[in-house]
């Protein structure tokens, strides 16, 4: 590739420039490290905002009866919680990690398109401000679930839905611009010698994720645009009375929505594939099979969308196909888990906080994978579908999966970013506190789901009371643990034991081997040597 | 907290066992896949735990440096594939059987999802009624402690005979709902403009309860299902009773009703059918659902517009056409109550015969 060109055009005029002073530094910055920081802070704020809504949900579900909020407001909470966590917390966190890490991992001075990088971030605060403002509008915020099935989200939706539609458009534009930037960076700006099959897996998984994003965000934009025209311009895409089809909405949504699931987990695979070898002091087992498994998962993710729709009355042939394709995904996913476990095998392990979160990820993500396999078996899915069993499943995958990998990544790379070690004792407390709480929170949800509790209900029959109470207690404890995490983050940024350049004994990769901790504002103005 | 009479126990860990043959197959398949997951989980987590315990630096472990093995990697791709085939074979047979609602169906029950109630039509018997959340649940929402079957009780349960193949036909009037009774192993979306089907052969008499499973708006959590499975003889008796009741209602609808009778009946009808949106006191929800109290349509001395919107609904909004849900007496009573209760006092009555003419 054209790495020489990238090298020649490296920003000589910026040489040894530090950041600008004041607030405008953050508004006008084109520096990948600054933008990474902005993304990570936005995602943390969104995590706390989405988490606060989860606390309202768990509070209302603490005991049977309606004590705290009205059902209409409860539905707004479940909807906004989902939207904020998916689009506001998890996705921007991974983009933040990509911004910070990709240039340093491939030996590039910055992202390929720095001005666009600034834009793709600064769209987001406006998108989320617009989305959050709907809560204060007459008729309330969107209350139709984060999957916004028509016609509940069209004919029967509150007026604020139009703000939701435009917020989703903005998020989509941001994601597509970010993805173009990531692809351009990875394909064009690698240091000489950094061949594709030498790239760290985090780079690989983000390259694949960026393609997924470019493929599916326009589909989501199409879905919300059709909603908009159904609402205001007399079309009937999703209205059977006008010749449309409400089920078509679900096909379009899940054609976006299922790859979206992998958008939120593939970069996590990359993070875990960096952390496990470091703390096992042993190279990653099966690097190339990891790359192929990631690509297979991405390709399969486009071909399984209707497994979210087994109760919509699809023809039996369609259900059979989607069942086979869905359970097939467990093969490459299994390969990944086996590779991580084998990487640990006969290693020389230590258990610092990033390793603890990574191990937690492997165990609990696998539990989410098992329930995913169960859900993929179409005839039984008719009984699991839309129950708390599904809620438990995707929270194991997204909270103890995606979110755990993000937290692990923070602890793993923050000494590199800031030059300060975090407080190991506090980190370990954070891990054990979170892990116990999150299992108290989500594990009982498997039981109530199997016993017959539907999801998205503000109140429930008495036989679900005990487990819901336990789940709520776990929820409050987990929420508090993340406030504690905020304290750790701030404490680490403000000071701490000086980190070495290598940071971890077993760390490998250009960011650890070729850059000081913290790295200079502009790193790799000269491409580093790649072994 | 829980009555001994309840069919389900607190701390129930596993899937509810079904009373239908296909439901038992689903349960078996569920246990099979769960068992496979447990075995794989024990293996993977066991190896991991062993490794974490023995291969740690503090125990002086020296890292090996192997990092690939084609043999092992092929093995752990092929073996899971074979396990999946082992799951797919029984799942395929069960799915094909599950989807065959038509063959040998003896009774057809049409189920219509409506925000937020179910309407049931026995196609061949000519019986049709709407089933709402029971008032006993509505009354205790602040503190339901000790209320048996809280949120799982209805005013009009469905009655079905045991040991007959029942075909359910699903559709919806407004948004998508899903009809789910765990013990019948039936969960199917009810979709506006489309008809889905499913089936059950109930093998044990009993009362089976379920809920709407697809988010359908504000009161999604408050539209339960109660199935009363009885012997064939009891079922026939029930059918005859329902048919006689319908005939009596039809004759009552031709009579002149007094204001007091209409308002009294209207209050019950209003609270069951209208209050979810328009509020128990008629205040509505600003920005979402209009108020009844002080509404210009209601207060209009000419009731034509009021009758029209209740009978025919309002296209493009959540206001349903109640001609599909309620009989003439109930609509007339609800209208009279809205005009002369809830803080309104128009002073006129709406007679069932007027509604019959407006249909």
Image: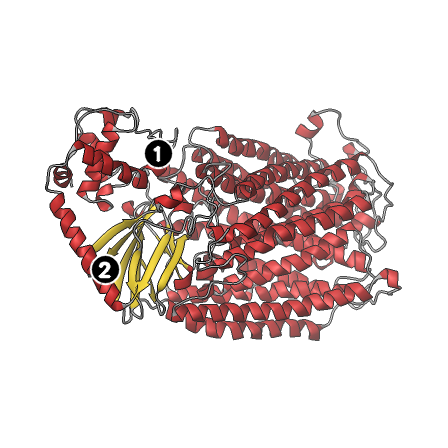
Name the image quarter holding residue A57: top right
In the drawing, what numbered circle is on residue B280? 1
Percent coordinates x, y for residue B306 in the rendering: 22, 31
Q: CA distance from mark 2 to mark 1?
A: 32 Å
Compared to residue A362, the image places residue B216 above or below, namely above
Quick one: A167 or B52, which is closer to the camera? Answer: B52
Q: Chain of mark 2?
A: B
Using the rendered image of the protein, determine whether residue B309 is visible from the camera's viewpoint.
no
Percent coordinates x, y for residue A288 in the rendering: 69, 64
Please identify the quadrant where the C terminus of chain B is shown: top left
Disc 2 on helix, strand or loop? helix
Percent coordinates x, y for residue B71 in the rendering: 70, 75
Q: Residue at x 73, y 68 (%)?
A: B47
In the drawing, what numbered circle is on residue B238? 2
Say whether residue A486 is left or right of residue A302. right
Using the rendered image of the protein, determine whether residue A491 is visible from the camera's viewpoint.
yes
Quick one: A11 or B304, which is closer to the camera? Answer: B304
Instruction: Return the disc, 2 or 1, that comes first in the chain's sequence.
Output: 2
């Amino acid at each position: 590739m054209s790495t020489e060109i990238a090298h020649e055009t490296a920003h000589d005029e910026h040489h040894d420039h530090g950041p600008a002073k004041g607030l405008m530094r953050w508004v006008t910055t084109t520096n990948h490290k600054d933008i990474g920081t902005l993304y990570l802070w936005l995602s943390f704020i969104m995590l706390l905002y989405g988490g606060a809504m989860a606390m309202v949900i768990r509070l209302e579900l603490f005991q049977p009866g309606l004590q705290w909020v009205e059902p209409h407001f409860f539905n707004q909470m479940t909807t906004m919680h989902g939207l904020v966590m998916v689009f506001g917390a998890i996705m921007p966190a991974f983009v933040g990690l990509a911004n910070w890490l990709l240039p340093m991992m491939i030996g590039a001075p910055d992202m390929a398109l720095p001005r666009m990088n600034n834009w793709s971030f600064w769209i987001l605060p406006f998108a989320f401000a617009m989305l959050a403002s709907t809560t204060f509008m007459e008729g309330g915020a969107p209350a139709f679930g984060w999957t916004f099935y028509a016609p509940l989200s069209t004919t029967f939706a509150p007026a604020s839905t139009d703000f939701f539609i435009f917020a989703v458009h903005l998020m989509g534009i941001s994601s597509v611009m970010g993805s173009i930037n990531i692809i351009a960076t990875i394909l064009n700006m690698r240091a000489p010698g950094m061949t594709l099959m030498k790239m760290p897996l985090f780079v690989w998984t983000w390259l694949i994720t960026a393609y997924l994003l470019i493929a599916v965000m326009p589909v989501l934009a199409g879905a919300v645009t059709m909603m908009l025209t159904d609402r205001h311009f007399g079309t009937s895409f999703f209205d059977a009375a006008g010749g449309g089809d409400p089920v078509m909405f679900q096909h379009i949504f899940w054609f976006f929505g299922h790859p979206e699931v992998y958008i939120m987990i593939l970069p996590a695979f990359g993070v875990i594939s960096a952390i496990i070898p470091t703390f096992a002091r042993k190279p990653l087992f099966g690097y190339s099979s990891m790359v192929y498994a990631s690509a297979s998962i991405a390709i399969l993710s486009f071909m399984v969308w209707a497994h979210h729709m087994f109760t919509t009355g699809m023809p039996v042939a369609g259900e059979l196909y989607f069942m086979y394709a869905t359970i097939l995904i467990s093969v490459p996913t299994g390969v990944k888990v086996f590779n991580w476990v084998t990487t640990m095998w006969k290693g020389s392990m230590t258990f610092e906080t990033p390793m603890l979160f990574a191990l937690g990820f492997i165990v609990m993500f696998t539990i989410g994978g098992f329930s995913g396999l169960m859900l993929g078996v179409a005839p039984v899915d008719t009984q699991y579908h839309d129950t708390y069993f599904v809620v438990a499943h995707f929270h194991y995958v997204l909270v103890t999966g995606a979110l755990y990998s993000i937290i692990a990544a923070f602890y793993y790379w923050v000494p590199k970013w800031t030059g300060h070690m975090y407080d190991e004792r506090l980190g370990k407390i954070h891990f054990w506190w979170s892990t116990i709480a999150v299992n108290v929170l989500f594990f009982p949800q498997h039981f109530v789901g199997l016993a017959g509790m539907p999801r998205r209900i503000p109140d429930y029959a008495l036989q679900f009371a005990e487990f819901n109470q336990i789940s709520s207690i776990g929820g409050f404890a987990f929420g508090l643990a993340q406030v504690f995490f905020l304290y750790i983050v701030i404490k680490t940024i403000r000071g701490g034991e000086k980190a070495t350049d290598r940071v971890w004994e077993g760390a490998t990769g250009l960011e650890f081997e070729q850059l000081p901790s913290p790295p200079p504002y502009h790193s790799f103005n000269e491409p580093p040597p790649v072994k | 907290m829980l009555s001994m009479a309840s069919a389900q126990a607190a701390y129930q860990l596993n899937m509810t066992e079904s009373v239908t043959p296909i439901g038992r197959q689903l349960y078996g398949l569920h246990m099979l896949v769960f068992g496979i997951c447990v075995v794989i989980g024990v293996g993977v987590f066991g190896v991991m735990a062993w490794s974490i315990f023995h291969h740690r630096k503090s125990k002086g472990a020296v890292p090996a440096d192997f990092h690939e093995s084609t043999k092992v990697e092929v093995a752990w791709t092929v073996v899971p594939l074979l396990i999946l085939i082992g799951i797919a074979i029984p799942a395929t047979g069960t799915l094909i059987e599950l989807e065959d609602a038509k063959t040998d169906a003896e009774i057809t029950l049409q189920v219509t999802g409506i925000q937020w109630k179910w309407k049931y039509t026995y196609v061949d018997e000519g019986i049709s009624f709407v089933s709402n959340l029971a008032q006993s649940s509505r009354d205790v929402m602040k503190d339901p402690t000790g209320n048996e079957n809280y949120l799982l009780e209805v005013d009009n349960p469905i009655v079905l005979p045991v040991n007959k193949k029942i075909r359910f036909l699903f559709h919806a009037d407004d948004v998508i709902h899903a009809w789910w009774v765990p013990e019948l192993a039936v969960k199917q979306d009810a979709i506006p403009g489309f008809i889905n089907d499913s089936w059950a052969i109930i093998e044990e008499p009993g009362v089976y309860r379920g809920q709407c499973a697809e988010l359908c708006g504000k009161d999604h959590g408050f539209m339960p299902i109660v199935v009363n499975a009885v012997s064939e003889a009891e079922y026939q008796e029930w059918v005859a009773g329902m048919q006689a009741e319908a005939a009596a209602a039809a004759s009552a609808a031709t009579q002149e009703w007094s204001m007091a009778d209409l308002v009294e009946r209207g209050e019950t009808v209003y609270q069951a059918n209208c209050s979810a949106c328009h509020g128990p006191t008629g205040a509505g929800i600003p920005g979402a659902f209009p108020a009844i109290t002080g509404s210009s349509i209601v207060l209009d001395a000419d009731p034509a517009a009021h009758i029209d919107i209740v009978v025919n609904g309002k296209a493009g909004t959540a206001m349903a056409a109640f001609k599909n849900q309620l009989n003439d007496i109930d609509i007339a009573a609800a209208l009279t109550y809205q005009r002369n209760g809830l803080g309104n006092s128009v002073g006129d009555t709406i007679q069932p015969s007027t509604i019959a003419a407006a249909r």
